């Protein structure tokens, strides 16, 4: 038993608590006071007072609050305003959905056609096996400008009306780090690859008002609570940071947020981090987010050798070595880490090389991290631990991308999504969802990490490179302790121990004991943040 003689605000009894604290890994009782863990043990009667709420959990499983270490939360919050194309099983499905939206859309207040925004299409699922085009969209929406982001987030398709509003013509050059899809005659075909190209169109789309974004975020907080999330590491743009700041000042921030700022804010990031108002355990600047390459879905992830079947395609490096070094120096000058998106093995090697040159001996408030780290050369795996770089990964990508990875990466998949290999060399894993690219539910990620297979008993034997599987305990650490370390919060978050933040989740089953095939069915019965029940079915 640990703790002091202070009295608890809340005492949870008859629990099966997995604390993630090496000093006391299991406990049956947890006491909370003033938003922090007061005591952990098996008999805490001495902290019960007249005002203590005693909650009998009936033996239920308790974990530290879960963290999504890579999410685009504002994008997720706004998905209800956009056409959801994740279930489109063909190009015709996509076009039917766009056509219905175009028929129902009213004009904007100034009388001009409203933009139609959508997300989530995946050409790899379609029998057509090709990217959509502006000509396809023009057939169903000739008047309204249409812009539809792919599931990967690294490509979009726009119709002619949208291309015209953006001023994209045959004469428009490819922007640095991006590519404009073209017909054989050089005319744009509607496809835009990577942020620099996609922004040519997306910058023309009217942004949601502050009120709309605030309301959307507050609704999304509730969805996160129902899934046991208490903290997010957000990778969205500057408008999301402004919204989180507004809500924080209004004491309406429903999750703890570690915000990674876009590269264009690098010159302000250190100053913003130093002078953040309010409780930094609720909102803090984590570091600077940088893109080094594209994605597998768009076949723009930068590779050391060409994509299988595409001998001329090595992917796209969206930043060159010199630019990345400059950003690293800016971050290091303010003691902030880089969080670098790198999916292909060439991009990962670039990041590792630059940080090898710039980072050793220079302190940062939290570790540098590579986001996704999906395909690694075997020579580079050990460099994560040697340099102290966190592997910020999303397990569900492995099960969702398996067929596509095998098609385009072939035998290289032996070191793709290499969680076990990274742990073996001593690297820290921090897991997330990349939502809205994938589902927000962290239990789908835990299942993917443990099984490397699809959902359901019939899929249980179809493990993909099973030597890379994790145990349930290792996967849970990657949603708790790993993210706390990655964010510089290891002294107050990620475990249920005295003086730690009282963030925890209560489950309907013991995921350490149930069959792994049942983990995706896990239901959250309660979520506690700062000692308060924000969601409760008990």
Image: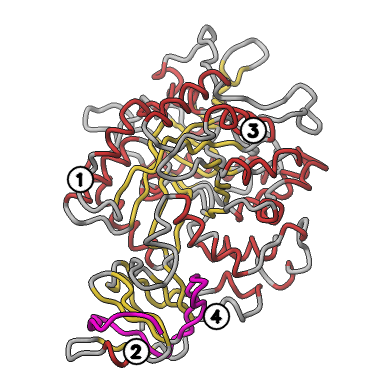
Q: Image check: 341 left or right of 386?
A: left
Mark 2 burial class by Cα count in 10 Å: few <14, some 14-19, many 20+: many
**Callout 4: SS:** loop
Mark 4 burial class by Cα count in 10 Å: few <14, some 14-19, many 20+: some
Considering only order in the chain, which callout, 3 or 2, is on the residue closer to the N terminus?
A: 2
Q: Nearer the viewer, mark 3 or mark 4?
A: 4
> According to the image, label 2 marks what residue?
44
Which quadrant of the figure has residue 35? bottom left
Q: Marks 4/2: CA distance?
A: 23 Å
Considering only order in the chain, which callout, 2 or 4, is on the residue closer to the N terminus?
A: 2
Does 148 appear in magenta? no
Q: Image check: 443 left or right of 247?
A: right
> According to the image, label 1 marks what residue?
277
**Callout 1: SS:** loop
Q: Nearer the viewer, mark 1 or mark 2?
A: 2
Find residue 491 and report its horizontal and vertical position in percent: 39, 59
**Callout 3: SS:** loop
Residue depicted at x 48% and y 62%: 480
> According to the image, label 4 marks what residue?
510
> According to the image, label 3 marks what residue?
301
């Amino acid at each position: 038993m640990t703790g002091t003689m202070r009295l608890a605000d809340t005492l949870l009894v008859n629990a099966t608590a997995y604390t993630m604290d090496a000093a006391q890994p299991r406990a049956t009782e947890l006491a909370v006071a003033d938003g922090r863990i007061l005591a952990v043990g098996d008999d805490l009667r001495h902290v019960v007072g007249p005002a203590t709420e005693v909650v009998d959990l009936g033996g239920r499983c308790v974990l530290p609050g879960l963290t999504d270490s890579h999410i685009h939360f504002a994008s997720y919050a706004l998905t209800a305003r956009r056409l959801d194309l994740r279930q489109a099983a063909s190009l015709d499905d996509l076009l039917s959905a766009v056509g219905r939206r175009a028929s129902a859309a009213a004009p904007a207040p100034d009388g001009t056609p409203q933009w139609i925004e959508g997300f989530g299409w995946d050409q790899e699922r379609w029998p057509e096996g090709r990217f959509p085009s502006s000509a396809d969209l023009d057939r169903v929406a000739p008047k309204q400008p249409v812009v539809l982001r792919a599931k990967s987030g690294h490509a979009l398709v726009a119709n002619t009306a949208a291309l015209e509003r953006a001023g994209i013509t045959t004469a428009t050059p490819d922007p640095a780090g991006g590519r404009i899809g073209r017909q054989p005659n050089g005319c744009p075909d509607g496809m835009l690859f990577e942020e620099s190209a996609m922004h040519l169109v997306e910058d023309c789309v009217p942004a949601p008002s502050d009120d709309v974004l605030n309301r959307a975020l507050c609704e999304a907080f509730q969805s996160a609570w129902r899934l046991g999330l208490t903290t997010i590491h957000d990778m969205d743009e500057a408008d999301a940071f402004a919204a989180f700041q507004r809500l924080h000042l209004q004491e309406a921030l429903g999750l703890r947020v570690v915000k990674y700022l876009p590269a264009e804010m690098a010159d302000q990031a250190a100053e913003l981090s130093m002078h953040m108002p309010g409780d930094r355990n609720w909102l803090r600047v984590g570091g600077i987010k940088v893109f080094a390459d594209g994605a597998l879905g768009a076949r723009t992830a930068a590779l050391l050798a060409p994509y299988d079947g595409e001998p001329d395609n090595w992917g796209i490096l969206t930043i060159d070595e010199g630019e990345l070094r400059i950003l690293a120096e800016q971050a290091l000058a303010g003691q902030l880490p880089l969080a670098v998106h790198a999916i292909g093995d060439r991009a990962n090697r670039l990041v590792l090389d630059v940080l090898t040159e710039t980072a050793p001996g220079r302190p940062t408030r939290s570790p540098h991290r590579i986001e996704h780290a999906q395909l690694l050369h075997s020579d580079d795996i050990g460099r994560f631990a040697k340099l102290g770089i966190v592997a910020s990964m999303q397990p569900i990508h492995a099960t969702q991308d398996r067929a596509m990875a095998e098609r385009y990466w072939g035998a290289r998949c032996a070191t793709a999504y290499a969680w076990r290999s990274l742990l073996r060399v001593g690297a820290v894993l921090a897991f997330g969802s990349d939502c809205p690219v994938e589902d927000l539910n962290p239990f789908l990620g835990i299942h993917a990490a443990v099984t490397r297979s699809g959902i359901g008993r019939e899929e249980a034997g179809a493990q993909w490179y099973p030597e890379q599987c994790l145990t349930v305990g290792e996967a849970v650490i990657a949603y708790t302790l790993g993210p706390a370390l990655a964010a510089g919060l290891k002294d107050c978050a990620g475990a249920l121990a005295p003086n730690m933040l009282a963030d925890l989740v209560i489950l309907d089953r013991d995921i350490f004991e149930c069959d792994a095939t049942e983990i995706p069915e896990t239901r959250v019965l309660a979520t506690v943040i700062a000692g308060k029940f924000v969601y409760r079915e008990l």
